[in-house]
Amino acid sequence: MCYYREQMNEHSTLTDWLRYQAITVWDRIAFCRRQPHTQVFETTLTQNLVFQFYQLGKRARLGVTVYESAHERRNGNDLELVFEVDNRWLHVPCQCKILHQHNRYGGINHQVQGQLQLDLLLEYATRTGGLPVYLLYNHYSDPTFNESLSEHWKIPIEEFGCSFISARYLKEQLFIDGRIKAPSFSDLHRPHDQSALPFSALTTLLTQNGIHQFIHRYQTNTHPTDTPPAVFLRNELDIDGWDRLLRPAAIGRIVPLRGPTPILSLSGISTSFAPRYRLVFSAEMKERVLYRIE
């Protein structure tokens, strides 16, 4: 952990910071699980993640802008991530879930007024042209499995403290008799499957493949029958409905390209996926080296 902290300097890229945040989450969960009267929740981890990127944007070390929903009833702690690559923008709505101590993502079964939270996320992504994912917060204590996973990816296992997986993959693979069987860490992080990817793979894949190739590769690997997400131009983005928590100028709410319903005029806001935070990663700052990989 100290090694990674020392690497965070003015030359750090977003990929470096995603790795660092993932390791921090892994260590935070491990610490709390070792203490008999200490707990950690996904809402806390999400708030910490948002704050860390807020600090980055405030210090102008990376092109990160943080927004909070202006809608007072959006009290959850889920996220939207927006990435700029090659003057195009990819919108990634994220449902955040923590791996419970009994090694199951029990929260994946969560319902909101009788509707699976997973289905609400998928509906939201369809309306907004987004790439729906689950952002997973992890600590797993099986040394044999961890060694295998680490060796396959050639990264420390702690970098899986945050990982992401296609929401549609979960729906297609785990939906049984009207319910999602709560998966385990090993169910979703099989070394030779690539169903769940380390957090830093988001920017690594975007940089190596470009935004359209990333979408094609991600779709082919996880859900080949799925409709690909939209790719936005800057003039198709605005800031309605989001309060910028720090400057400089960036973007806000995405105007849907498909379907007639804008995000903020959805009826029954409490039964829709309603992200509270948006993190926008722009290549405008730091001489356009936000995604540089050393």
Image (tube, grey):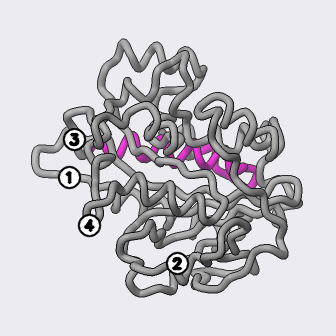
Q: Nearer the viewer, mark 2 or mark 3?
A: 2
Name the image quarter holding residue 36. top left
Tag 4: amino acid:
Gln
Q: Which mark is residue 248?
A: none
Mark sitting earlier along the chain (2/3): 3
Horizontal side, residue 174 vs residue 153: left or right: left
Q: Nearer the viewer, residue 187 or 258?
A: 258
Mark sitting earlier along the chain (1/3): 3
Name the image quarter holding residue 63. bottom right
- Range drawn in magenta: 6-31
Q: Which residue is mark 4?
A: 113
**3D distance between C-alphas at marks 2 and 3:** 30 Å
Name the image quarter holding residue 88. bottom right
Tag 1: amino acid:
Gln
**3D distance between C-alphas at marks 1 and 3:** 7 Å
Tag 2: amino acid:
Glu
* Dot 2 crowding, Cα within 10 Å, few <14, some 14–19, many 20+: many
**3D distance between C-alphas at marks 2 and 4:** 24 Å
x and y percent of residue 121 in the render?
47, 58
Mark sitting earlier along the chain (2/4): 2
Q: Nearer the viewer, residue 133 or 186?
A: 133
**In the picture shown, does residue 132 fall above or below 99?**
below
Mark sitting earlier along the chain (4/1): 1
Q: Which residue is mark 1?
A: 39
Rendered residue at 44%/55% (across/down): 95
Element type at mark 2: strand
**In the picture shown, does residue 155 fall above or below 245?**
above
Query: Is residue 2 in view?
Result: no
Horizontal side, residue 289 vs residue 62: left or right: right
Q: Which residue is mark 3?
A: 33
Q: Which mark is residue 68?
A: 2
